[in-house]
Amino acid sequence: MVADAKQRTGWVVLRRLPPESSARAIVVTLLVCMLSSALIATAVNVLRPYQERNRAQQRARHIEEVIASVPGLADVLGSLAEARVETRLVDLASGSYAAEADANGFDSRGAARDPDTSLVLPPERDLAGIGRRAHHAAVFLVYEDGRLRLLVLPVYGAGYVSTLYGYLALDPDLQTVRGLSFYEHGETPGLGSEIENPRWREQWSGKRLRDPTGKLRIGVARGRVSAGDPYAAYEVDGISGATRTGTGVTKLLHFWLGSDGFGPYLAQLEQKRGAL
């Protein structure tokens, strides 16, 4: 209403100004800017529900891709709509499930932007380069015959030129990777975008998170990983020409598997693993 009133006032002023005056040109410019802003704001509000629905569908597709990477599991589970996939909201600080929270409707990006539902990460702890981290995160537990078969964790962090958003799937031992899939990024085509290449993604299956001392080792090597490499059990091949993207993947995994990410949650699951 205020914008409409301003625009009406602007048109009145415009009609009173001489056709060739500089003031008229300024008023025309201001009116065009106001009209453009109003149109953009309207478009954003109208399109937002469609954009959110598309993002949700895209996330679901990529979770399905992660599940499909486990031999035979997709046949057992069928669609994500089935009750065998359970979505839970985790309090990242404590590692416990958030009581009476709607995990399915959780807006992770909105929560990370809101100062009331997120925390600022000091630079020395912000391995993923995300600035703020939401207090909660939605996780997906895949069950078969009442037993946990797969745990899917959302992960994201800075790549070379964009933020990488993906899902990490772990076996029930909580130490073996079953799949890693990135569903959104803006990395350089033909270089960093190779994180979407199925052949590169297949390398993640079977990699271990930690060495026997408990140190996180999972990540992307700087070159090719040979069979005799001491870190072959933990690393995948680096992407030629995309070292910084690979480094970003390693750092975001170490962040989300560490104490500021899902570390406390995984520790609790480890204690209860016999009952899962």
Image (tube, rainbow, N blue to C red):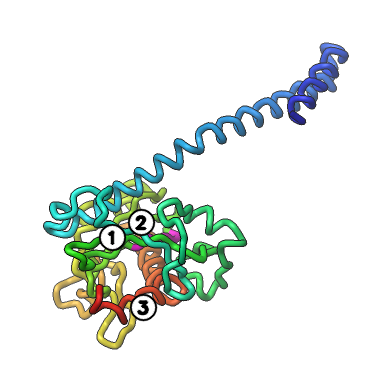
Residue pictured at 23% horizontal, 75% vertical: 173
**32 displayed left or right of 67:** right
Which of these two is toward me, 218 or 60? 60
Residue 244 visible: no
Q: Distance between the residues labelled 2 and 3?
A: 23 Å
Residue 239: percent from left, percent from top: 29, 59
**Residue tagged by mark 2?**
166
Mark 2 or mark 3, which has the lower sequence index? 2
Q: Do the residues labelled 1 and 2 touch (CB within 8 Å)?
A: yes
Quarter that holds the N terminus: top right
**Residue tagged by mark 3?**
268
Residue pictured at 61% horizontal, 62% vertical: 116
Quarter that holds the C terminus: bottom left
Q: How far apart are marks 1 and 2 (CA)?
A: 7 Å
Which of these two is toward me, 1 or 178? 1
Query: What is the span of residues highlighted in magenta in the rendered image?
Result: 153-158
Closest to the camera, between mark 2 and mark 3, is 3
**Residue tagged by mark 1?**
180
Residue pictured at 57% horizontal, 67% vertical: 119
Amino acid found under the numbered disc labelled 2: Gly
- Check residue 64 for magenta coloring: no
- Check residue 154 for magenta coloring: yes
Q: How far apart are marks 3 and 1 (CA)?
A: 22 Å
**Which of the 4 image quadrants contains residue 222?**
bottom left
Residue pictured at 29% horizontal, 88% vertical: 213
Residue 99: percent from left, percent from top: 46, 66
Secondary structure of the residue carrying tag 2 is strand
Which of these two is toward me, 257 or 161? 257
Amino acid found under the numbered disc labelled 3: Gln
